[in-house]
Each structure stands twice: as structure tokens, then as C-alpha cells.
Amino acid sequence: MTSKVPSAGSDSSGIGGTIALLNLPAYTSLSLDASASQTLKNEEDLLVISDILPPNGCHLLVVKGGGKTGGDNDSTRNNAAMMQHSIGILIFQPSSNYEISIGGNKIKGGGSDGWFIARKFDKRTEEISSELLDQQSYENLKHSVVERGGNIIDRRKIIPHDRLFPSNANANIGNDNQSHHEIWSKHLTNFISRGVLSKHELTGKGDKIVPGTFTEKEDEKDIINASGKMNIDEGNSNDEVQELEDGKSLIYPPIPHINESYSIQAHQGTRRYLANLTPSERTKLFLGGSQGDKNGLIFEHILFKFYDGNWKILLGQFQLSFVVFLCCSCLASLEHWRDTIQMLSLVQPSTVKSKSALFENLLNTLKYQLFSFDSDIFNDQEFVGGNFLLPAIKRLCDLTKNQTENKTLQIRTNELLNQLHSKIPSFSYNNEREDNSREVDEIMYESGGGDDDDDDGPIVVSMDEITASMERTSASMTKMQKNFEDSDRVHASKYPFLFASKIDDEDILMTVARILDEKNDVTAVREAAAYLEEVESQKNQISMAD
């Protein structure tokens, strides 16, 4: 929902943070901390948002450039504004003072004093510029706005945070009755810290965040280093580097899914993760026992490699990816948020027990994250269907429900399930596990109403056709079983990665051709080439014998 910016003029109390925006065009859309967006009616040479609370913690201002001035009505301008993508301005103010070094520059901040950020709109790019104001302009503006010095700034240009983005509509989640600002600071961003921002080389001093997505070009390169940061290709031209420096596109570490129901090559995060393992790490993973054991091993490996063994940083990056996805429509952030939920839902109960604090806070965060969505999105089968949200939450609830000695986990699980049921009235949860290995991936969504289309009705098949089909199937299965016992069983033990890459309705030669064409997995490519060479050698020997 979009509304007009309220008139200003009241003097602020000087507490909290302050954001000054310069040269904003008409019909620019603003949103702070996922509040309802506000739209400028006129061009503003200066707009100041003051008294941003709480003074400490994470804030995200989203700015979407105004529409072209080519139309006389609101519809034309709004349509033009929709063509612009959202830019985020990220601010993080810890409660204690700090000093860090990023790119050779020392950054200081923190404390309980109010902070001040100033950014200008670049009409050439039609978005907020990542370039800082020169030091003299910055100091003069700060002196006029924050310290109330001189008579340079029109008081009407300064609008308190609670007037521009009111939070008088309280949120009712379970037994809670909290404002939007309280939910943002206490539940959606409470684990975002300096350690989380350092993973993306963010300062928290007004970093420009641009929506990003993971590309196939990056999928072919080993660009994740041991610290979890991304390396920029040294072959980039100056223009490419400059484009990368105009804001930050958040890049996340690969999060894999090892699920016996699907090929390991089917998921992008899994391919990236396996490509960065050493041969010994890969051997340990695939010989690590059951699927749950493998996912537990993956979780521990990711936790220590990319998050320094600190689950709070993992959960903080999970929260950061959600708010950047929610506010800036960032696909890469959505994928990381999705993959983290999937990974944590596939671990063993022993992992939940040893990391109970992580799962307690994860369930609480998920409860408030789900509240942030419009109810309509839960009717989107691509979002809540069998490959994503609801099956993963059911797995989480299965894991946490079984931790009967942990009362906090029980309470958080019930709160999350109640929240889901309030969003999706037809959602049901059955705590009894089934033996079917695919049960965890089935959708827990009962669509209301039937389909009256006669084309979907029952089809009568004669018994003769059924008998003939069963005979054909039996003969085919017998032949396939014999071939497998005579040849493929030997090759399967000799080339485990090759045979693990097979997908449905694909013979081994088709798998070899696909692997050699895609070149996504070094070990699989090596085994495919060796297998093909062995087959060709056997064919030549048979030809010579004839």
C-alpha cells in the first residue's frame, strides 16, 4: 500500500538516528524497515527522516526512483515508477563503540549517540548514489540537521520517523501485541551483528544494497574461499569493476541439500558446495552413513567454514537475507533464505539437541517472518508447494516436537504451527512419521473444493490391457535386473559419483553425455570420461576377437 508523505514542520527531539536524502525526484517511493511505502508528491531537494528508533540495531531504508515526467496523471507516473528497482540503504549501529578496517579504510561507530547518514539521488542512474558527500558538505548538513545549528535547513524538511512511517497498527501474533517497529528490531533483525555484516564487507554506515542473483557464470568458478567471502574475477574490465562497486549485491555461501529422492546435480547450491570440497572431504561426506548423518555433517562443516562455528552469525545472515529479499526483491537473498530452511530441516535430532538455542530462535524468527507476508502469497503453489516452504517447516516441526525434554522448543513449535494455521486455514500437521521416504517432501496443503472438469474423471481400462502391460513390465524388469547384475553393479562400485548422478528415465550413457556436456562436477566428469574410455576399450577388444 502506498500513501503520500505527510506534511512536516514539527521540531524533533534529537534522539535516535537521522537520514538525509538530497535531490529526490517526484513520485519517489520510500520505505523504512519494511513499513508501508510512502510516495513523494513533489520533487524534494532535501528530505530528512529524524528520530529513527531504536537508535541501536539494524535499519533498512528502501528507495525506488520516481517515474519519468512524461505523463500528467498518477497512473502514468506510477507505472513508470514500477519500472525502477528498489535500492536499500543499510544502517547498523551496535550498542558498543567499534573500529574496523574495510578496504584499507578505518570505520568507527557504535555507542548510544544518534547516528547521521546522508545520501543523494543521482539523476543519471535514476537511483540513490553509492558515493558519499564530500566531507565539508556532510559536516555542514549534519551541523544544521542534527545539532540544530545555523538557519540553513527549513524545519519543514525534517520529518520524525514515527510521522513518516507510523507504527500505530499493532501486530497480533499469538499472545503478542507489538508494534511493527518492535517486531522489526526484536524478532526480524535481532541477530544481525557486525560479524554478519563483515561476511559481506558491509560497514553499516549507509551501505547501498542492490538486488542480485546468482549467475551460471559464477556456478562454473571456484569463487568461495575458506572465509566465506566472494572473490571478484581478476579478469574483469575496469567498467565491470566500477559497476560492481556501485552498491553491494549480497553473495552468500552455498547451502546444499542431500536428499536421496533427488539428484545431487539438481540443486544449484549443492553443485556449488560439492565443487568446493576437497577429495577427502567429498569421500567423507558420501561415506558418512544415512541421509540424516550426511546433512548433519554438512551443517557442521558449513557452520565452522562460513560462520566461524557461531550459530548466531548463521541466524543473523538468515535474518539479513530475509529482510533484503522482502524489502528489495533480491532473488539471491530469497534463495539463501530458502536453502537455509531446507538445510536445517534435514539434520538429525541429535543436531537439534546439541544446537537447541539455534532452533529455538529459528522457530521464533520464522513465526514473525511468515507474518510479514501478505496472506495471498500462501495461495501460490510455487511458493508453498511440495518443493519449498511447508514441507521444510513440517520437517522442522517433526524434529523439534521430538525434543520432549526441551519445553521452550515445544512452545516455539506450537506457536509456529498456530501462526501457519492462521495464515493458511486449510494447513494441517500430522506428527506421526510415515515409512515412505518421500513423505517429508509431500505438500501439507489441502486445497478446498473439487474440480468439475470431466476430463479429470476416472478412465476404465480393460483387464486384458492390464494383464498385457504387467507382462511387458515383468519381462522388462527381468532383463534390466540381469543387465544390472552382470555389468552395472561392477561399474556402480567403481564409478560411484557417475552412477549417483543418474536421473529418472536416463541410461548410463545418457548420464555420461550429460555430465561431459554440463561439466558441473569435476569428479563426476573424471569418472564419466574413464567409464567411456573403458567401454570403448571393451568394444575394440570384441571387434578384434571377431
Image (cartoon, grey):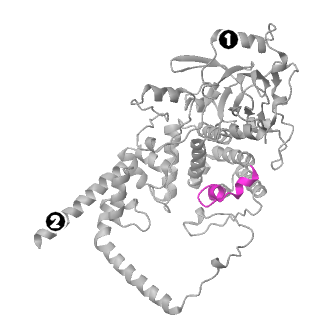
**How far apart are the two marked residues, 2 and 1, measured between alpha carbons?**
79 Å
The C terminus: image quadrant: bottom left
Residue 247, position as x, y percentages in the image:
57, 29
Q: Which residues are magenta?
A: 374-398
Q: Quadrant of residue 218?
A: top left
Q: Residues within 10 Å of mark 1 (few under 14, many from 20)?
A: few
Residue 331, position as x, y percentages in the image:
59, 44
Is 344 or 200 nearer to us in this picture?
A: 200
Q: Amino acid at mark 1?
A: Ser
Q: Can residue 378 be seen here?
A: yes
SS for tag 2? Answer: helix
Q: Amino acid at mark 2?
A: Asn
Whether residue 422 sits left or right of residue 99 in the image: it is right
- Placement of 303 over or under 98, stated as above or below: below
Whether residue 171 sits left or right of residue 260 in the image: it is right
Residue 315, position as x, y percentages in the image:
62, 40
Is 385 or 79 nearer to us in this picture?
A: 79
**Which label's residue is closer to the chain start, 2 or 1?**
1
* Residue 156 magenta-highlighted: no
Name the residue that disc number 2 marks.
540
Residue at x 71% of width, y 29% of height = 57
SS for tag 1? Answer: helix
Q: Can residue 146 be seen here?
A: no
Q: Quadrant of residue 206?
A: top right
Q: Which mark is residue 137?
A: 1
Q: Residues within 10 Å of mark 2 (few under 14, many from 20)?
A: few
Whether residue 131 sits left or right of residue 507 in the image: it is right
Q: Which mark is residue 381?
A: none
* Residue 393 magenta-highlighted: yes
